[in-house]
Image (cartoon, rainbow, N blue to C red):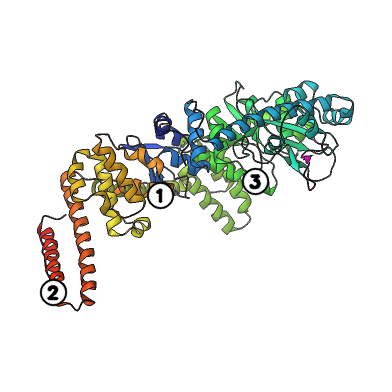
Amino acid sequence: MNYYPDDIIEEVRLNNDLVEVVSEYLHLEKKGGSYFGLCPFHREKTPSFSVEPVKQFYYCFGCNNGGNVFHFIMHIENLDFMEALRFLADRAGIALPEPDDNEQQHKNKLRKSILEVNREAARFFYANLAGKTGQMAQQYLFQRGLSLQTIRRFGLGLSPDDWSVLARALRSKGYDEETLIASGLCVRNKNGSLNDRFRNRIMFPIFDLRGNIVAFGGRVMDNSTPKYVNSPETLCYSKSRELFGMHLARKSTEKRLLIVEGYMDVISLHQAGIDYAVASLGTALTNMQGRILKKYADEIIMCYDTDTAGRKATDRGLEILSQLGCRVKVLQVPDAKDPDEYIRKNGPEKFKNLVDRAISLLEYKIRQLKMSFPADSAEGKLAFLNGVADLLVEQENIMEREMVMKTISRDYDITIDTLQAEVARRLNQKKRKDKNREFDNAVRKMTGSVRSYTIHKKEGQREQNELYLITLLSRENYLYPKAAERYPVSCYTEGDIREMARVLYQRLSDGHDFLLHEYITKLDPEKASIIVACSQEFCNYDEAVKAFEDILQKLETIKLSDELKDIQTQMKNISDEEERKQLANRLNDITQKIANLRHAPFK
Ligand SMILES: [Zn+2]
């Protein structure tokens, strides 16, 4: 449901150029009038995701996902329409007015209160750490090597060893129960009163980019479990979006970012002078986090733990980051389980050296291959070399390719010529494939679709032609009077299509434009995809008038054929001779009409 007026929604759309927005998620290349990239919604090796800069549509030829900037954000950020609208308004710096809707107003107010109460809670936790009861916790933090300055800088605190002291303190400051629960600071217990979520834990406030405290992480000081308790997702906090330490790291003068796993890693790195460290909250890096990282840094270094979970998270993160077009490196910390431990053992300078020696993505992948295929057998060696050749084909930097080949030829006792020949062979193969694909795309562009997709098969002939007509009319407004006469709104298939036709006809008869890319904002993503597919693939007409005639003829024929079937059914059940005659006459009429239509020039 839309709580905002249409012109504001449209303003938000116009201020978020689709090419720019999509580029924040994936690497786009210009080909002809469109942009192509690897689809973020399905796995693919060759780009079939297209963005139309003029129409402001995106469409994937592989998975048929399509729409405008709102649908794109809804899909990729997993948001509903209102959230996507807010997201894009924020992005464009447009202040949304207070919505008319009460529920929405209430949500906005609650969001503000949550941020306030979080700040209040952080003060409370800090005071508790600095006070008498916090002495043990202070000792603990000092022992872990943190200075007082660092503790203040990150706003660390201590939650009291009590069931409800925070809840009581915040209630006395005037915050209501709803806010306390909505913030995640408190939970309602069986008796109906409030308990504190965090008890006797070191508290790490999580700041958003603007410096608001949106959540907390709480860590125990001994070996009890769970080691960490974190705020739940709230109106202000989504863990897939925030990065711990980002509000500080974004101000770093280094144009790079180091991603680590834990809060303590970030804090001790910053203390060691590496002020560009951040942590993803939860092990796996998300698309959204990758996008933020890309916005603030030219180079991103991944430094996750080296256990199995950490390696998996590294692979996933690398995939996300390289799909976004980031320059990525990998840092593997030797002889320590994480950066925090390494720095405590070896000092900050040694760690800085490690950062400078972080390996490239290619080198990292080769190391992974080496682990999977030990060189102690001929098969292992061959599998390894084949894997390397695959990697080198994808490597665009010729110098790096050359360097790798040299090392491999030395280590694996194979001539560099052989390696080069194999890589060249695969490169040629790849080029041929790319050429074919480009050719297919070009054909598709010139002729409309040559393939048919499941999504369109679901629509009948009639629905499909109605969608063509709508698409065509939205482009060629002058055809409207004729369309209204020959195929009025009441002819359209009931439901969304008729509703869309109704709006279209209304706008055109009032002398307004009907912009398809504006209208599809109102459609759910699945229907938007159908419309975009139709406009991208099926309606590349050179001659609009001829196309218009064709479509109308088809629709009229379909309509008449339906009538024909109706009459035939009726005739079976009629005994009255006079009525029968009448029906027979109409049948003749219709048959004649259909024949006439067939004789008209038909595409
Ligand atoms: Zn796709």
Give the image location of residue 507, x and y in percent.
28, 38
- Name the residue that disc number 2 marks: 578
Crowd band around label 1 with a 10 angstrom C-alpha radius: few (<14), some (14–19), many (20+): few
276 and 497: which one is in front?
A: 497
Secondary structure under badge 3? Answer: helix
- Residue 32 relative to residue 529: left or right: left
Q: Which mark is residue 173?
A: none
Give the image location of residue 294, x and y in percent.
53, 32
- Which secondary structure type mostly characterizes the magenta part of the structure? loop
Residue 279 in sight here: yes
Relative vertical location of residue 175 with respect to residue 381 in this rendering, above or below: above
Which badge, 3 or 1, is on the more N-terminal residue? 3
Secondary structure under badge 1? Answer: helix
Mark 2 vs mark 1, CA separation in Å:
81 Å
In the image, what residue type sits under mark 1? Arg
Mark 3 vs mark 2, CA separation in Å:
84 Å
Placement of the C terminus among the 4 image quadrants: bottom left
- In the image, the segment drawn in magenta is 190-201
* Picture quadrant of residue 22: top left
Secondary structure under badge 2? Answer: helix
Q: Quick check: is 195 in the magenta stretch?
A: yes
Q: Which mark is residue 311?
A: 3
Tell whether circle 1 marks a residue whose Cβ is less than 8 angstroms from ligand 1. no
Tell which tag, 2 or 1, sits nearer the viewer: 2
- Name the residue that disc number 1 marks: 425
In the image, what residue type sits under mark 3? Arg
* Picture quadrant of residue 591: bottom left
Crowd band around label 3 with a 10 angstrom C-alpha radius: few (<14), some (14–19), many (20+): some
Give the image location of residue 23, x and y in percent.
45, 35
